[in-house]
Every structure is written in structure tokens, then in C-alpha cells.
Amino acid sequence: MEAAMIAPALALTAFLAAPAGAQTRSAPDLLPIPARVSSMGGEFRLTPDFKVALEGPAPARLRKALARFRRRLSDRTGLRLAPETGPQPAALAVSIQRTGRLVLHEDETYGLEVSSSAMRLSARTDIGAIRGLETLLQLLDADANGYFFSAVRIEDKPRFPWRGLLMDVSRHFMPVEVLKRNIDGLAAVKMNVLHLHLSDYQGFRVECLSFPRLHEQGSDGWYYTQEQIREILAYADERGVRVVPEFDIPGHSTSWFVGYPELASTPGPYRVERRYGVFSSAFNPAAQSTYAFLDKFFAEMAVLFPDDYVHIGGDEVDGADWEANPGIRKFMKDNAIADTHELQAYFNQRLLAILGKYGKKMIGWDEILRPDMPKSIVIQSWQGRQRLAESAKNGFMGILSADYYIDIYKSAGFHYLNDPLDKESSLSEEERARVLGGEATMWSEFVTPENIDARVWPRTAAIAERLWSPAQVDDLDDMYRRLAKASLRLEELGLTHIKNYDMMLRRLAGGPDTAAVKTLADVLEPVKDWWRFSRETPYQTGSPYTRLVDAVAAESEVARSFAKLVDEFLADRKTGAQEIRARLIQWSMNDARFQPIARRSPILREALPLSANLSGLARAGLRSLDHIPGGGMDKALTRELMGLVDEARTDYGGAQLAVTVSVQKLVEAAARQP
């Protein structure tokens, strides 16, 4: 099976047709796409007497996974399936060789065969079998005769061993149930790491028995008890997901100093930070008491968190507080430490010895990389693929996050086409092997438990495919087609990325009539990148996150589909003209319906210019359509319509119209001389 898995992937759009005489099926909507898929022709019909047989080892993790599998099958189909595994003959035979461990490079391969008479799932580990069960659930389909699984042969393995999601629970605390439902989402798309960013300026989020003032004074009361941490760890373990804790030091550390100001480089006093940004507070690396404290702290955390890796952060230390402390300056002089960068390297070396003492390996952001660090550390790159490649060339393992910052509202397509290994990379095979994968990063300055799922999903599923599937799998249109269906499957797991949208719109509208608000919201996106840090009234942790910009999707599916319609129409001047016109008419009339709602609901008034601009933009599109395919629109009208387009580029309330470029294309086509 190994050789077949290494073979190039078959694109699902070229899924093999069933044999002659059999009913032809379309491609199964799998995401991520497996390493190798081929059609067997026909299907396996699901009936209430469906049974599963376990052959060989039957660890608790696998038995629980099979119970969830049956439950999800039953919920999706309405069939009362057999509640227990049964003896042979069974509809599904599952076999593994051993119990897997939640460690880097654990075997996640599996093979799946579905015929008209039976199904077989085989894997080396129970974790691989869990990945295969998710694929089998994605294969479920239906027709007039009931539910069935397409007959296929799948041989699958991940391209990268580290496929994760960072969740920042410091800026905004996320309750246990939020973490659990996102762990379910990770497992559904075959991701295997939940990276918890547990401390920062705005909060320290774990109960610490050795130093209780950390959570008592540094969290505003929002923290996970150790019992809750063990609950989260057990939940993730059952789904084959590692949990990697991050305690960001020596910077990003104000919350530590509220209860223990003696750890800091300047005397304070300190309070939990309400603002966002980068501040100068940092641990005192010259005090031996700092390392005694951290030794005792990590001794406790090493027992609580079983993963081999502990993330130490290490980013954005500006050194100002170090330079302001005469004792630290003297320490640097006495120890021939040239600058604050070398001082941080000294701190990291001391910390590395502490972690090693407790059997842990270090992972940190780009800033921890120094030539004298051991090659066992892992670099998480937020500064780009070039930095990641440089670390690999220098012998260090690394993971990419720079292109997977899902908090800055880039499209699923943008993330999907950014690969940890650039196709033009000059890395050798040995160096490429040091690139372990990547992590989507959900920094939480501007999310709450209400809307975090909508910022994570479904775009993270596109990142999951990039990290699991072969590099050759890069068809954007096909990815978006499958992503839409994957998004609905994710909702079955309790994720709120779809349903909370309408709920938030009802609150904004002040009632159940949200049609006009939704028409506008559907074509809006948040302004990209870090606009709230630089352009709005400074946000704080207690600010409201219930405005229209907080409700709209990170990527407008309506705008994306409209852009596709326009491009197809302009390519042949025939396809889609009627649908384009219908959408433009709807948008042109929406402002008259939106204005009365905004007058009744003051929270919506900041969106009034957007609503007016959508109407003007739509009128520009309609006038342009009247001149296509002939073209030749006069210059005065062209200037007038381009003025409407330019006005529509302006963002208000942090949101922007996502259909502006498509309408501009219509105007330009209409103005083109015949």
C-alpha cells in the first residue's frame, strides 16, 4: 500500500466512471482529497442491520470513534442502526495493528475499500482508522432508493505530519464547549493539532497550583481549571488530536506580573491589559529567581499537558524594559551579552534546559531561532515562507503560519494556494522534510464565542486540504465546490459558523425581518488585514463585537459566485447575463428597504453609506449591461459609472463591498471601443 500512496493523486474531478452498464456516479465530495482514489463501480447500500466488526486490537479510542461514527450515520439518515459492533459477517470490517500515540510523525495512513457487498477499513493505528472513518462519512450519499456509499478504493496518508489550528484563548476566553466543537471540526477534516495560546497581555488562562495568583489575579476569573484541561485533553485524544500549550514568554507577559510583579523587568504595578497591541513588559532574564519560578511552573505544566512539545512564544520582545533596567544592563555587560537579541537567546537557552529537564521539546515563533539552538526545536513561522525555508536550510524543523492567519479575513482560495513548500523552492529533499506542515492561527482580538466559529470555518478546511492532500491538488473551483458541502457537514458537529449568522442579523435588525440586512450583509466582507488596530477607535477586550462587521462572513460566497458569473459572461457575452441582471436589480432596490430598518436600529446606521453605495454600484452594473456586447459607451457616462465604482470602494464600519471589482469589469467592458 505504501508505494501506491506515494504515487501522484488522482484529481476527483477525473473520478473514474462506473463500468459499462452500471449507473454513473459523480465524484464523491471528499475534503481533504485522499492520496489515491479510484472507482470500483456501484455502491454499498446502507440498511438498518448495518454492523461493524473489529478485527485485531480494539483500543478504547477506536471503540469510541466507532460509536460516534454510528451515531452520526444514524442522525444523518434517520436509520436505527445497530448500537454495538457485531461479529462477522458485518457490513464494515475495521482492522488495525496497534494503538497509536499522539506524537509527531505518528502513522495516520489507512486504506478503505467499498464494494457493493461489504466495506473494509484497515490502518496501522487506531488514529489512522479514525481518519478513515471520517472519509467514509464523507462518502455517504443518497438517491430515491435510500442511502449508499460509492464503491471506491482509497489509499491515503497525510502529506505533512503537523496540521493544526491555533486558538488564542487569552485575548478573549473561549469556554470548554467552544474548544470541544472545534476539536470535532479539526478531526472531521483530518487536522491533528490544537495549539492553545494560553497566556498573553490580556489574560492567563490555566489554573496553576504552584503559583495560584497567576490565574486568580491574571485572568479576570476566566480560566480553565486543571480538571477542565484534562477534560479537553481527553476529548482531543479520543479524536486523534494533540493539544500543544503555549505560554508566551518573555514578552506578551503582563498577565503573569499582576500576581507576581517580581518576575518583571520593571517594578509595575501591573494589571490585566485591556488594550490590544505590542507592549514592552517582559520577564527579567537577569534574575536567577525568574528561572527558579519557571522551573517550578513548567514542572507542573509538564505533567498537566502530556504532549512532547511546549510552545514558549518568544515573539515581539522590543527590549525597552530590559534597557530601562540598570541591573539588567549590568548583567549584560558582565556576561558580554551584546544586545537584547542576545539576551533573549540567553533566556531561551535557560528555558530550553528547564523544558528538557521535564522531557519537553521547545517550539516558538521565528524570533527564537538562533544558530546555537539545538536542532530539536521547532520554529513556527509568522514571518513568511522565506524564513521557514531559511530555518530548514539551517537544520531546524518548522511549521508555517504566515499564510494561514485566518483572523485577517483572507479568502479560502488565498490560504489554499499558499503551500508550506513553495513549488519553486530550492530546498533539498532532506531540507524539505524539515518542513513539518502548518497551523491556521485564530488570534482572538476581534472574536468572541459567538462568532469565532465563523472566522475559523469553513476556511480552515481549505488549509486542512493543503496540509493533507498531495501538492498537485490545487483546483480552486473544485475546492470551493467541495468546501460548501464540507461546511454543512461541519455544522452537524455543533459548529455555529452558519446558524449564528442569521441570529446576529436578527439582533442587528431588531426583529425577524432581516431580508434587506441580509442582502447587504451577503455582499460585505470585513476590511482585510489589521484595520481595527490602526483605523478605528481603539478596541479593548470589553468592547462590543456585535456590529455588522462582526456578523458578516470573512469571505462573501455571494460575491465570489457573482465574480465567477461576470467572468464567464465577459468571456463569451452569452452565459449568465440574465442572472447577473437579476442580482443587480435586487441590489439596486435594497437600499430603500434597508434604510427604514437602520432608522429603527441605530447599530446599523454606520452601514447606511454601504447600502447606498451598493445601490449605486448596482445601477452602474445595469447601465453597463445595456452596452454589452456592443461596447462603445460614451466617455461621459463611463466617467459617471466609474465614479460610482470608486465611491463603492470606500469602507464604512470596518466592512467593504466585495462585488466592486466585478462591477468595474462590467463598466470597463461596456466602455471598450468596438
Image (cartoon, grey):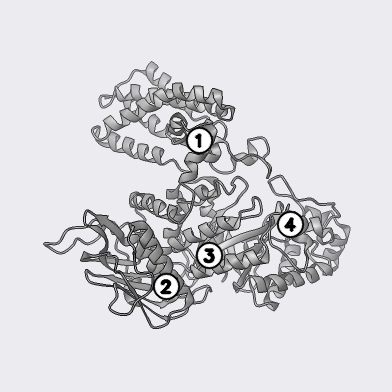
Label 3: few (<14), some (14–19) or many (≥20) C-alpha neighbours in 10 Å: many
At x 44%, y 35%, the residue is 523
Q: Mark 4 and mark 2 in contact? Answer it, CB < 8 Å.
A: no
Q: Position of residue 582 (x, y in %)?
A: 32, 28
Q: Which of marks 4 and 2 is nearer the N terminus?
A: 2
Tell me the amino acid under the disc marked 4: Ser
Q: Name the residue under label 2.
A: 128
Residue linked to disc 4 = 253
- Residue under the image location 48 percent in, 23 percent down: 612
Residue picked out by circle 3: 193
Residue tagged 1: 506
Seen as rendered, the residue at the extreme top is: 636
Q: Quadrant of the C terminus?
A: top left
The amino acid marked with disc number 1 is Arg
Instruction: Choose mark 2 or mark 1, whichever is in front.
Output: 1
Q: In which quarter of the image is the N terminus?
A: bottom left
SS class of the residue under badge 2? Answer: helix
Q: Which of marks 3 and 1 is in front?
A: 1
Q: CA gap, disc 4 to disc 1? A: 39 Å
